[in-house]
Image: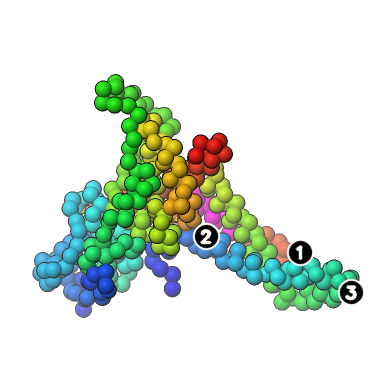
């Protein structure tokens, strides 16, 4: 039973073949995060409980889990803000589970590459450094989308990803949009071709689940809307 | 039960747009049937028009007007979102689309009474 001194928590454990929730009672602490709870269980009760984290300060993006039905960064989610009822922790949705709370991120990163998420330089190291004016429109748009920590929270929140395996998803397309606005980049045509293709931006239903869950307050829907406009323009002009 | 990750206003706007579209598609056969009556001659159509004076039918028509308006305003909202420069007021637009549709339906009902 949970009291002021304890927290009831259920943690999903299993692998790709299936699994189930197991219940624990964990001592409560001030400013306790969901990651603290998982760590307490692993260190005190369930030594083979498998989960991922690194920085514990919201920088690395590795600690994302499903907390009471919503994808969250667990190192920066206080138990007191995790939602009503007993705490229920599960692996992220939309990614294959390896074990317990750890998902296989391969498809997530493969889709970054598929969407054209790799910077393509327009100059070599021997050329002079171009001056980038931080106030110009393109740079402002690129900067707005750039603070992504690759946590896959948006990917896990997206129903279009759940329905279509081919869809690159919000994070990869957000990355593509930040590169499209990068004036040093030379890969715009390939990137827009990918964005207009089968896994691209036109799969997005604009419901903005990604934007409402992104812990860094990025707005992938905005980026995807930008891609849609750019792809339509490029198509009309015969560029892609 | 609506999944926790969907509980945000813009998902509800999306769902309303989908559901109104589906219901309108279901209504289409009835719409064509009435058009067919008009082709058959005045008497058949007049019989139908007399039936629509029934208050329950008026209410159903009001619902239909709401569905049409909410689907149209919702569609305009999505087109603006995708084709015009981004605005931070997405939730306001969704609320305005629903409120506008409600207003149109109320005007229809007042006019029909
Ligand atoms: S807005 Fe698009 S990318 Fe974002 S969650 Fe919805 S469908 Fe997915
Ligand atoms: S866009 Fe936001 S939610 Fe998505 S991977 Fe990047 S930081 Fe995470
Ligand atoms: S552990 Fe690095 S973001 Fe949570």
Query: Dot 1 lies on which element?
Result: helix
Instruction: Choose top left, top right, bottom left or bottom right for residue A180.
Output: top left
Which element type, helix, strand or loop, lies under badge 3?
helix
Mark 1 vs mark 3: give the one in front: 3
Q: Is residue B73 above or below residue B105?
A: above
Label 1, residues with CA under 10 Å away: few <14, some 14-19, many ≥20: few
Contact flag, marks 3 and 2 (Cβ < 8 Å): no
**Subunit bearing disc 3:** B
Taking the spot 43% from the left edge, 45% from the top edge, the residue there is A194
Task: Estimate how packed mark 2 is, as few (under 14), some (14 to 19) or many (20 or more) residues with alpha carbons within 10 Å.
Answer: many
Give the dominant element type of the magenta stretch: helix, strand or loop. Answer: helix
Mark 3 nearby-residue class (10 Å; few <14, some 14–19, many ≥20):
few
Could you tell me which chain the residue with mark 2 belongs to?
A: B
Q: Provide the residue span drawn in magenta.
A: B89-99
Q: Mark 1 points at which residue?
A: B111
Marks 1 and 2 belong to one chain: yes
Report the residue at 52% width, 60% height from top: B13
Observer-side mark, 3 or 2, equals 3
Image position of A150 (left or right of B50):
left
Tell me the residue that label 2 is attached to.
B13
Chain under disc 1: B
The quarter of the displayed image where residue A92 is located = bottom left
Residue extending furthest toward the right: B42
Viewport quadrant of the N terminus of chain A: bottom left
Foreground of the two, A124 or A81: A124
Circle number at residue B43 = 3
Residue shown at the point (78%, 74%) measured from the top left: B52
Give the CA distance from mark 3 to mark 2: 42 Å
């Amino acid at each position: 039973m949970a009291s002021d001194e304890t927290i009831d928590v259920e943690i999903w454990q299993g692998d790709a073949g299936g699994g189930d929730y197991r219940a624990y009672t964990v001592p409560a602490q001030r400013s306790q995060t969901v990651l603290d709870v998982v760590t307490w269980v692993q260190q005190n009760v369930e030594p083979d409980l498998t989960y991922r984290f690194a920085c514990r300060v919201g920088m690395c993006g590795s600690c994302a889990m499903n907390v009471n039905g919503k994808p969250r960064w667990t190192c920066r989610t206080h138990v007191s803000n995790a939602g009503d009822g007993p705490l229920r922790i599960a692996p992220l949705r939309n990614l294959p589970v390896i074990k317990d709370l750890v998902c296989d991120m391969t498809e997530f990163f493969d889709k970054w590459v598929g969407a054209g998420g790799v910077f393509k330089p327009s100059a070599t190291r021997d050329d002079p450094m171009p001056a980038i004016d931080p106030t110009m429109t393109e740079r402002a748009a690129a900067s707005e989308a750039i603070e992504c920590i690759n946590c896959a929270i948006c990917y896990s929140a997206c129903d279009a990803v759940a329905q279509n395996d081919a869809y690159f998803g919000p994070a990869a397309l957000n990355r593509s949009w930040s590169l499209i606005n990068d004036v040093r980049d030379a890969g715009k045509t390939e990137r827009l071709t990918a964005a207009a293709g089968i896994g691209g931006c036109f799969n997005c239903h604009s419901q903005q689940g990604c934007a409402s869950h992104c812990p860094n307050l990025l707005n992938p829907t905005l980026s995807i809307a930008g891609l849609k406009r750019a792809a339509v323009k490029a198509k009309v002009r015969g560029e892609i | 039960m609506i999944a926790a990750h969907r509980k945000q206003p813009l998902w509800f706007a999306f769902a309303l747009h989908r559901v109104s579209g589906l219901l309108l598609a279901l209504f289409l056969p009835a719409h064509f049937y009435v058009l067919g009556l008009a082709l058959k001659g005045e008497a058949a159509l007049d019989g139908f028009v007399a039936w629509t004076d029934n208050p329950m039918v008026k209410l159903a028509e009001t619902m239909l007007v709401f569905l049409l308006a909410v689907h149209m305003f919702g569609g305009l909202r999505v087109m603006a979102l995708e084709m015009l420069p981004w605005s931070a007021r997405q939730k306001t637009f969704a609320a305005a689309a629903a409120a506008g549709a409600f207003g149109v339906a109320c005007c229809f009902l007042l006019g029909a009474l």
